[in-house]
Amino acid sequence: MPEERIISTSAQDEDQQFDLSLRPQQLDEFVGQPKLKEVLSIAIEAAKGRGEAMDHVLLYGPPGLGKTTLASIIANELGVSIDLTSGPVLQKKLDLTGALTTLIPRQVFFVDEVHRLFPDVEEMLYSALEDFRVDLMVGAGPGARTHSIPLSPFTAIGATTRAGLISGPLRSRFGLTLRLNPYGVAELTEIVFRSARLLGVEIDDGGAEEIAKRSRGTPRIANRLLRRVRDYSQVRADGKIARPVARTALDLLEVDPFGLDEVDQKVMRTILGKYAGGPVGLNTIAASIGEDANTIEEVYEPYLMQLGFLDRTPRGRVGTRLAFEYFKIELPQGPQANLRF
């Protein structure tokens, strides 16, 4: 299953016990995303200066980049508590009403996967975000009436990996809409160093950089790989993570220098080798490697496209010249090849 891949961006059970100990608590401890941090710093200071709840915030971007961590940091910086929930948990209006009516003034209300709210729950959230009230319908038929419950002013933080699925009315009620971008190798190296220090792991520049390069631009993956390399170093080396140790451990885990695993490589080698670089249909690829088509499209393809190895065209998937060079597969010859490359 995709969620069991060591380089999966989704949170895994093994991550939970480490997340809290490695998670930064203040904005200046959060590595990367400089523009986003600057915007948040100004908004936080302004809200504290006025003694008001901060504007609602929508955080979006790929999984594993730190949206939940940022929500906790915002609450810490504001000096308030945080109430965490998610879109799938809020299945009924009463679920949302119960959560909102217990909030204290200026508290942070964090909704993960906010794009998965049910429509009737989302509509109730509109008035809560805009006017700090929830409207309940009491009774039925001609005698029904609307009862408004006032709420304490609060800061809602929504997080999503699918910003395009959020409706316009909901998006417009967030004062700040901020995107988290994949991290560069230098930023991930800094994150690996910080996590290694907190875990009591001895690591040098080369070891940290090797882990960072194979982390697919994602801190969650970097921390997961660090723990696996730490185990290898403890058992097969002297306990110190140098570049050769990190490289050997990650090769053993079948995570290549670009962070590709066995399935990523199988997808690309099928397109490049079996179908001469394409174009080839998604369902054909799925049948060839025995994977679900939706899983390929949603889990594997985005990173392959980010690397510049794969293109989506109206006629199907096409491998790029860069991919042929990386996988050391000879480019196809003839007029069709000239059209593609």
Image (spheres, helix red, strand yellow):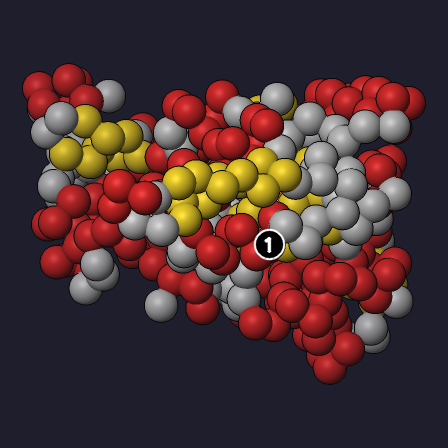
Instruction: Judge left or right: residue 275 versus residue 71.
Output: left
Near mark 1 (Cα within 10 A), the count class, few <14, some 14-19 or many ≥20, is: some
Residue reaching furthest front? 143
> Which residue occupies 25% across, 46% down?
141
Asked if residue 55 is positioned above or below residue 4 in the image, the reply reads: above
Closer-to-camera residue (308/297):
297
Residue reaching furthest right? 49
Asked if residue 231 is positioned above or below residue 78 in the image, the reply reads: below
Name the kind of residue labelled 1 in the image: Ala
Q: In terms of image quadrants, where is residue 122?
A: top left
Q: How many labels does the image show?
A: 1
> Which residue occupies 22% across, 61% down?
291
Which residue in the protein does label 1 denote? 99
Q: Label 1, secondary structure: give it.
A: helix
Residue reaching furthest bottom? 235
Instruction: Judge left or right: residue 265 versus residue 248.
Output: left
Closer-to-camera residue (112/82):
82
> Which residue occupies 82% across, 73% down?
239
The x, y position of residue 200, in whole percent, is: 88, 67
**Quadrant location of the N terminus?**
bottom left
> Which residue occupies 82% across, 59% down?
196
Q: In terms of image quadrants, where is residue 32?
A: top right
**Quadrant location of the C terminus?**
top left
